[in-house]
Amino acid sequence: MEFEKVLAFRQSTRSFTEEKVSEKELTMIMNVASRAPIGMHNYQGYSLMTITNEAVLNAMIFSYQKLTGTDKNPLYKAPAFILLCANEHSIERLVQQDAGAIISFMNLKASELGLGSVYIFGMIHTILADDSWKKLANISSGYVPIAGLAVGHSKNPIRERPWVSYLTTSFIK
Ligand SMILES: Cc1cc2nc3c(=O)[nH]c(=O)nc-3n(C[C@H](O)[C@H](O)[C@H](O)COP(=O)(O)O)c2cc1C
């Protein structure tokens, strides 16, 4: 797909069908992380894991609901969640910047594949200290969950969006 089209199709999806996403597509999405810019070329500071196991996804949702006292599903019933973790090699002041680049690249790739996806930070931030879901997901103690991308097939057709100028821009000449 032409790059401008990918940008126009990229949008947050928060309503998914029950259809699974193929491992091939999920791998393609994870692979673009290695094309994302990372501070100080520190790719070794991160790893990605795709969670499709329902028990693990439910444990994350349950943890979020328990801690917030809501019944909101922070993953919007997406069948897959790509979790970014930082390890002991990560550079603290760069982690959130690197995460932005990695998740955004994956968000764009999902759009190119015609899949729905949404950047998830809030849930991870909320459930960070809860070890129960991490145990179930086999996340070892040296790995810190940072953010992720919920991925699935959108319930609603994903339409090309018109360009809107949300940010002020200027030149300093
Ligand atoms: C750093 C960051 C964190 C985000 N966290 C969440 C989140 O936890 N849950 C959610 O539904 N959307 C989340 N989003 C998605 C934004 O709400 C969304 O990208 C923004 O509203 C623009 O909409 P669009 O993606 O459709 O263009 C996050 C986006 C970014 C960049």
Image (cartoon, grey):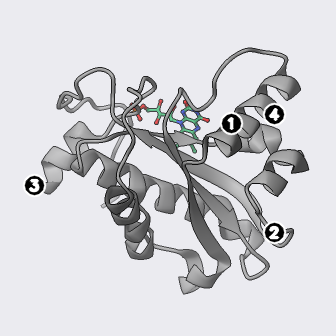
Q: CA distance from mark 1 to mark 3?
A: 31 Å
Q: How many angstroms separate mark 2 from mark 1 (CA)?
A: 21 Å
Q: Amino acid at mark 2?
A: Ser
Q: Residues within 10 Å of mark 2 (few under 14, many from 20)?
A: few
User: Which residue bears the numbered disc 3?
Assistant: 2
Going from N to C along the chain, the mark reached first, 2 or 1, is 1
Residue drawn at (68%, 64%), measured in percent from left and top?
Answer: 85
Q: Is mark 1 within 8 Å of ligand 1?
A: yes
Q: Mark 4 or mark 3: which is in front?
A: 4
Q: Nearer the viewer, residue 132 or 3?
A: 132
Q: Position of residue 162 (x, y in %)?
A: 18, 28
Q: CA distance from mark 4 to mark 1?
A: 13 Å
Q: Secondary structure at mark 3?
A: loop
Query: Measuring 69% from the left and 55% from the top, which residue is drawn there?
Result: 146
Picture coordinates of residue 22, whole percent (x, y):
35, 52
Instruction: Please rate how many residues cluster around mark 3, counting C-alpha atoms within 10 Å: few if below 14, some from 14 to 19, many from 20.
Output: few
**149 shown above or below 156:** below
Three-letter residue code for mark 3: Glu
Mark 1 sits on what residue?
122
Taking 20 as reference, is 3 left or right? left
Taking 30 as reference, is 40 above or below it?
below
**Contact (Cβ within 8 Å) of mark 2 with mark 4:** no
- Dot 2 beta carbon under 8 Å from ligand 1: no
Residue 52's x, y, as percent?
Answer: 54, 48
Q: Give the amino acid at mark 4.
A: Ser
First in sequence: mark 4 or mark 1? 4
Select label 2 or label 1 by which is in front: 2
Of the image marks 2 and 3, the number of the one nearer the N terminus: 3
Q: Nearer the viewer, residue 62 or 9?
A: 62
Question: Residue 89 versus residue 64: which sits nearer the camera?
Answer: 64
Marks 2 & 3, CB-CB < 8 Å contact: no
Write down the residue under mark 2.
140
